[in-house]
Image (tube, rainbow, N blue to C red):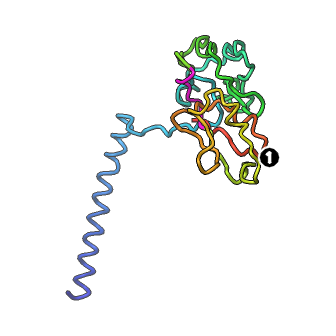
Amino acid sequence: MPDDSRDAVHGRRAMFRLGLKRVVEPFADYLQERFDLKAPAPVRRQWLRPPGAVIESEFLSLCYRCGNCVDVCPAHAIHATGSDDPDLGGTPSIDPDMVPCKVCDTLACTRTCPSGALRSLNSAREIRMGLAEVNLRACVRTQGEACTICVERCPIGSEAINVGLSGEVEVDVSGCVGCGVCQHYCPALPKAIRVEPL
């Protein structure tokens, strides 16, 4: 095919694509606005929330910032988050480095929430605050110490964390509730185990 003919074909295709784009884009924009088809971006959880917390976007809209869960926590682990962000300020959170959740039998925080931001739970096994992640390079076991503090202190026990056959600390995803006790008592600096909020 001569170059002129090839250029003409490409020119027609480009013109057709441009024309189609001009027709389709406004229609797509109209549908998006009319039916609110744009999915909201998920809100990533920055803070470790108390037991029973619903997903972060719902939590932020439901939470009254009333402080009931803070007041009834027997471990004094829950505190009002200090933040300049009006969406976050005053919401309840837990800092395991300061005081971890003790996974108490009463689960009082879940039962005192008036807004539904914290769902009522039947047992500690239903808690899913976060997931402990091990940094093996920071773990003192890799330096020859026979430390098992994180395993011994875990309120859930071997269902959540144990020392594997390799001698390394292993977290069981199905058992870990994310209470932060392991992080709190870890003697390594920086901490060899930290809880990532879910």
Q: Residue furthest left?
A: 1
* Residue drawn at x 29%, y 60% as measured from the top left: 19
Q: Is residue 155 or residue 123 the one in the foreground?
A: 155
Quarter residue 3 falls in = bottom left
Q: Is residue 10 magenta?
A: no
Describe the element under mark 1 as helix, strand or loop: loop
Q: Is residue 128 magenta?
A: yes
- Residue 22 x %, y %: 32, 55
Q: Position of residue 143 (x, y in %)?
A: 76, 54
Residue 33, placed above or below residue 73: below
Residue 159 placed where, x, y %?
A: 56, 32
Rendered image quadrant of residue 70: top right
Residue 177, percent from left and from top: 58, 30
Residue type beneath disc 1: Leu
Q: Nearer the viewer, residue 139 or 78?
A: 139
- Quarter holding the C terminus is top right
The residue at 60%/43% (across/down) is: 170
The answer to whether residue 38 is left or right of residue 135 is left
* Above/below status of 192 relative to 86: below
Residue sitting at 68 percent across and 25 percent down? Answer: 101
Number of marks present in the image shown: 1
Magenta segment boundaries in residue numbering: 124-131
Give the labeled residue for mark 1. 189
